[in-house]
Amino acid sequence: MQSRHFVPGALVLLLQAALPVAFPAAHAMGQQNPSTASGSPASTARATLPLTLEQAIDMALASNPSLRSATRAIGIADGAVQQAGARPNPELSFLTEGTDRNARTETTQINQVIELGGKRAARVAAAEQERNIALDEVSAKRAELRADVIVAYMEALSAQERVTLAQASLDLARKSKDVTGRRVRAGKLSPVEQTRSGIAEASAGLDAAQAEADLALAKRRLAALLATLRPIEQALQAPAAAFDQLPAWSALAARLETSPRLRRARSTVAGRDAQVTLEQAQRIPDVTVTIGAQRERAGDGNGGRTQGVVGLSIPLPLFDRNQGNSLAALRRADQARDDLEAERLSLTQALADAWQRADVASNQALTLRDQVLPAARSAYDAAATGFELGKFSFTDVLDAQRTLFQTRAQYLRALADRYRALADIERYVPVSGDTRATH
């Protein structure tokens, strides 16, 4: 008789211990409840110091080599700006007419190119625009990296919760097998029920092993973004409630023009326009000014005559007026404008898709949390109570348990889909600090 009361009580208590994991708590109330896959001392120590989402983002922004490589382009552009402002160097030349040492003419002169048409200013402006492109490229890379870290983190967090869920299912299956075995030996259940409980335990063990493997894989992907080869041993915890908020579509659409990718596209247009100005300035020829001295040696050995030399030379733009480069620069500017419009359309579509996916996943999660999960748990409690009273078979309990855990897994998938969609929104437009939400 003692075992009859122990069976459903153990099942219900173990199930209740498995239910309050981090995802629903954070989604519902904004709490941060780290969960671990086991109750070992190492797991407990990791849970006391979890790796938060913001910590992971900061580590990636500080250490990711791809972002560092993009940042190097700013220094490269700084050098180009400095070089663009340099003026042409003067040229020193020495000419000798005649081979007789005592009767020859020696000319020493300095030639200086004077740029006309605003070439230097146009060159500096073009270089500065390239630097702006590099800055916007870094901003776009940072946004991409941030979104990638959010996706990888939430996938790892979802895998961590699946481990907790799979472990709870395995514990239940083991406990059910033990209890079923005792009841079979007491003649209260058919041996077939013991076989079924053994199959359920084996299946739960496979699910738990797969969940552990998925968690290890997800953490390796996250570690790669954090630029570390060491496996992540810390537990993960659900992000703060602010990240859970889904901004209104009107607020996101208004921020589209602040997208790092659109800023990069606009900087590219400005850079191509600056290049057009530079190429058009190249059509105006530069003037070369010559200043020097010419010394004529007398053949009789007496001192020769020295006179100043002043010259001016300018190319005649008869054949090459830089028309080809000017035309190419104009076409590149037109191409950049087309790319800007295409980028705006693409971002608008992608942002709308991400927002809709987040909204659908939010509705699914709310429905599962508020309606489906309570119903599945109620069905399981009824099956466990009926099994205790002898009104239901062990198969009914297993079916109710399987339905409850499947519903729980479906809820976690909906939350993970929502976080991935939110990460994509972060990829396209800045939403940090937004306080308006649709749910």
Image (spheres, rainbow, N blue to C red):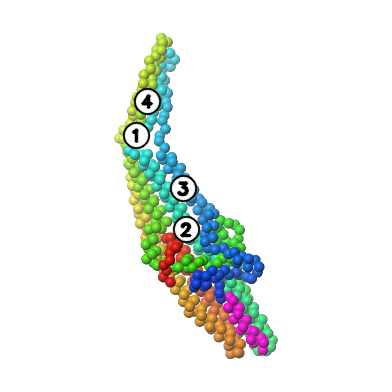
Question: What is the spatial separation of the Cα atoms under label 4 and label 1, in whole angstroms?
Answer: 16 Å
Q: Which amino acid does label 1 sit on?
A: Asp
Which label sits on residue 291?
4
Mark 4 vs 1, N-terminal side: 1
Q: Where residue 389 sits: x, y (%)?
A: 60, 89
The residue that mark 2 highlights is: 144
In this rendering, is residue 178 above or below 63? below
The residue that mark 3 highlights is: 74
Task: Identify which residue is drawn at 56% across, 59% down.
Answer: 223
Q: Depth-wise, is mark 2 or mark 3 nearer the camera?
A: 3
Mark 4 vs 2, N-terminal side: 2
Count every numbered label the image shows and give the total.
4
The residue that mark 1 highlights is: 286
Task: Identify which residue is drawn at 36% across, 45% down.
Answer: 275
Q: What secondary structure prevails in the magenta region?
A: helix
Question: Which region is colored magenta?
Answer: 1-18
* SS category of the residue bearing label 2: helix
Q: Tell whether label 2 touches label 4 (CB within 8 Å).
A: no
* SS category of the residue bearing label 1: loop
In this rendering, is residue 91 above or below 106? below
Task: Identify which residue is drawn at 58% across, 78% down.
Answer: 16
